[in-house]
Amino acid sequence: MSKTLYAYIMIVIALFGLGVFLYGLHEAWEPLAYIVGGLIMIGIAIAMNELYDRIPINKGGDD
């Protein structure tokens, strides 16, 4: 899978999760399922992104 396609999929999943989360906050009669579902989708997108492309964090100091 190319990085461009993977990035596009991550953006779509994150936006979908954010939309579901905001819709859940908007709906007063059934918020819990949408809020939890949105957080799960956002969490999946973040976890997949972390697993796919880890960026090493250099914390200064001597080389």
Image (cartoon, helix red, strand yellow):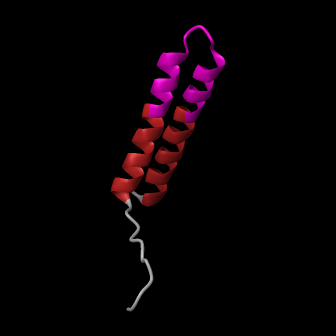
Residue 56 coordinates in the image, percent (x, y): 38, 71
As drawn, the residue found furthest toward the left would be 51
Report if residue 55 lies within the magenta region.
Answer: no
Residue 4 coordinates in the image, percent (x, y): 48, 57
Q: Quadrant of the N terminus?
A: bottom left
Location of residue 57 with respect to 8 vertically, above or below: below
Say whether residue 28 is left or right of residue 52: right
As drawn, the residue found furthest toward the bottom would be 63
Quarter of the figure with residue 29: top right
At 41% from the left and 67% from the top, the residue drawn is 55
Quarter of the figure with residue 22: top right
Location of residue 20 with respect to 11 vertically, above or below: above
Location of residue 4 with respect to 60 vertically, above or below: above
Report if residue 28 lies within the magenta region.
Answer: yes
Q: Quadrant of the C terminus?
A: bottom left
As drawn, the residue found furthest toward the front would be 61
Say whether residue 17 is left or right of residue 57: right
At 42% from the left and 71% from the top, the residue drawn is 57
Q: Which residues are magenta?
A: 18-39
In front of the other: 2 or 40: 40
